[in-house]
Image (tube, helix red, strand yellow):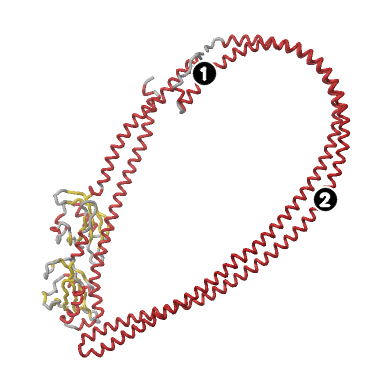
Amino acid sequence: MRFTNSLKFRLTLIFLAVTLVPLLALASFQQARYVSEITENTMSREMEIATTNAGIIDSWIKSKLMQLVRLYEYHPEFNDQQLNEIIDILKIIRQSDQEVETSLAADRFGNCIADNYSKRPSMAEQEHFIRAKETKKPVVSDIMDSERTGSRIISIAVPLLDKEGNFLGVIQSDAVVKSLENTIGAVKIADTGFAFLMSGNGNIIFHKEWQRTGKNYRQFAADDTEIKAFDEEVLVNDSGYINYMTQNHEGKKVEMVGAYATVPSTGWKVIVTAPADEVYKHVNMAKLVSYVSIALVAVAAALISVFLANRISKPVIITANHLNALAEADFTRDLPEIRTRRNDEIGSLMKSVNIMSKSIRNLINDVVKESANVENNILVSAENLAELSERIGEVSVTTQQMSAVTQETAASAEEMSAASQEIENAVRTIAEKARNGADVADRISKRARELKENAMISQNTADKIRTDIDAEMKKALEKSREVNKINILTGSILQITEKTNLLSLNAAIEAARAGESGKGFAVVASEIRKLAEDSKDAASKIQSVTIEVIKSVEELASGSEKVLDFIGTQVISDYKTMVNIGEQYYNDAASFNTLVADFSTTCNKLIIAIQNMVKAINEVNISNSEQATGTHEISRKALDVAEKAAKVLELINATKQSSESLAKSVSRFKI
């Protein structure tokens, strides 16, 4: 037999396939899933960082913008004042916000003055002034260098409009963006990943490589994929993910993966990016470990497969050779005992073959032995037939004795019939008394039913009382909640006092600006503030009293709930117990009634059984007569048995010849 056709070779291939195919499939699936999770987690983290920083920048810019907007809302007189008067008020912003470097005011022609009262170059040609003039809305400039300190700043301008909406000029704050650059510069992802800030037209506002700051990204683009990613994705969409090739500080091209988000108030782009090699370095290491592991498992699987195939096929070959020997009628050998000690299916197979071999060997031995025994039995049977004839004579004598016994049995049956009649009369008396007991049980059952019904009526009455009390209590509690409206009114009073305080504060500011002529107005403002404080204290006291009232109502509700709980848990529970007792009393009466009825039924059955017994005794008498006839029949058949015995002797001789032929047939087996 060729090795490729052997069981050993086929088992080896099957073991390898069963081991390696699932392993390779699982490794591929896990690898793909790992790459997907790494990509998703990295992208999600980059997007989260970009979105968070865009929100921080937007909040920072809006806070600076709202300083100007609110100041303008509180001072609509800006529209009628000179620039130096406006600057007096704008200085408040610079004094309260250290990030505001300069405050400016300009007329509609762009003529401006700074917070140090120095005149500045005309703003008429500056991009953010033109946008504020055209849109008549607040604007934010791109980052630029300060002429005053050289710091990087942004200009936030709010247009001044008259009642008809005509442009009168702007008020402006120049804010230092150092805190924003620190926020963006602190971003780190993977090992060397970073974040940078870009304007809506592609100019880099902040970058960790300082030489790129202030320049357009296209000047540093090292690959078309970078230009395409920024032109078609970053500068077009509000947020998303990008992949591109760029050049690092060493001059090498690297693949980058990143995410971006837009600052709503400026249109700036926050880009968070990291080298793909760093993002997927754990994936590459996992691939290498997987490949080495699979190779080691494959070698181990091959060795184990060869070992298992040899362990399975070798016992099968030995068993096949042993079966060939059995087929040639050689039962002198057994399989090696060491092979039959295995606890698997092959061990069971070899044990079964050994058992089969031993069974056949024992069977042949038994056949040889039984052939000799049959021959001996034939001789013994012949002798027994002679004895059988003698026994037939003895049977005839025995039948006569049986006839005498039959007569004695008939006399005993008549005595039993008389005793059975007396027993039947006694049982009838017991049955009558059982029927009287059933009537008594029925009366007990009626009284138990009345007790149960009365208890149920009392239970329903108590439950209705509890329900009515509960409903009335809920109505009272609902009405008591009207007290809460006092809290609402006192809250409104507190809001009014806060607004009054704010008005008095503004009045005090105006009085201070008016100088000596505003002192009387300042006194009035002080009295208004005092009145507002007194109103606030009174409203607070009303709220305290209201809280005490509500607390008292809640305690009343709690006490009512306890009363209802007592009725629901104790009173109604006791009524339920009475109902259950009545029910149990009724059930016990029914059980007693059933017991008496069963006893009466049993007595009736006993009467019927006694009658049947009398009938059976009569039948015994009839059987005695039939037995006498049977005894005569036995005597006649004894003669027939003698004739059959002669025929059995002939069959015994034929069996002897068959036994000799069987012994000759089994003599060819080797045992």
Going by the image, does 505 lie left or right of 227? right
On the image, the x and y values in percent for residue 78 come to 21, 81
On screen, 595 above or below 262? above
User: Is residue 110 something that shows in the picture?
Assistant: no
On screen, 563 above or below 448? below
On the image, the x and y values in percent for residue 325 come to 48, 15
Marks 1/2: CA–CA distance: 77 Å
Q: Residue at x 14, y 58 (%)?
A: 210
**Which residue does the numbered mark 1 point to in the structure image?**
357
The mark that comes first in sequence, 1 or 2, is 1
Count neighbours of disc 2 (C-alpha within 10 A) and say few if under 14, some if 14 to 19, many if 20 or more. Answer: few
User: Is residue 12 something that shows in the picture?
Assistant: yes
Three-letter code for the amino acid on which mark 2 is drawn: Lys
Three-letter code for the amino acid on which mark 1 is drawn: Ser
**Which residue does the numbered mark 2 point to in the structure image?**
433
Find residue 416 and name its label. Answer: none
**Front residue (pair 479, 265):** 479
Q: Quadrant of residue 578?
A: bottom right
Could you tell me which secondary element the residue under label 2 belongs to?
helix
**Front residue (pair 95, 47):** 95
Indicate the quadrant containing the N terminus: top left, top right, bottom left or bottom right.
top left
Q: Residue at x 44, y 76 (%)?
A: 547
Q: Quadrant of residue 664?
A: top right
How many badges with numbers are in the image? 2
On screen, 25 above or below 459? above
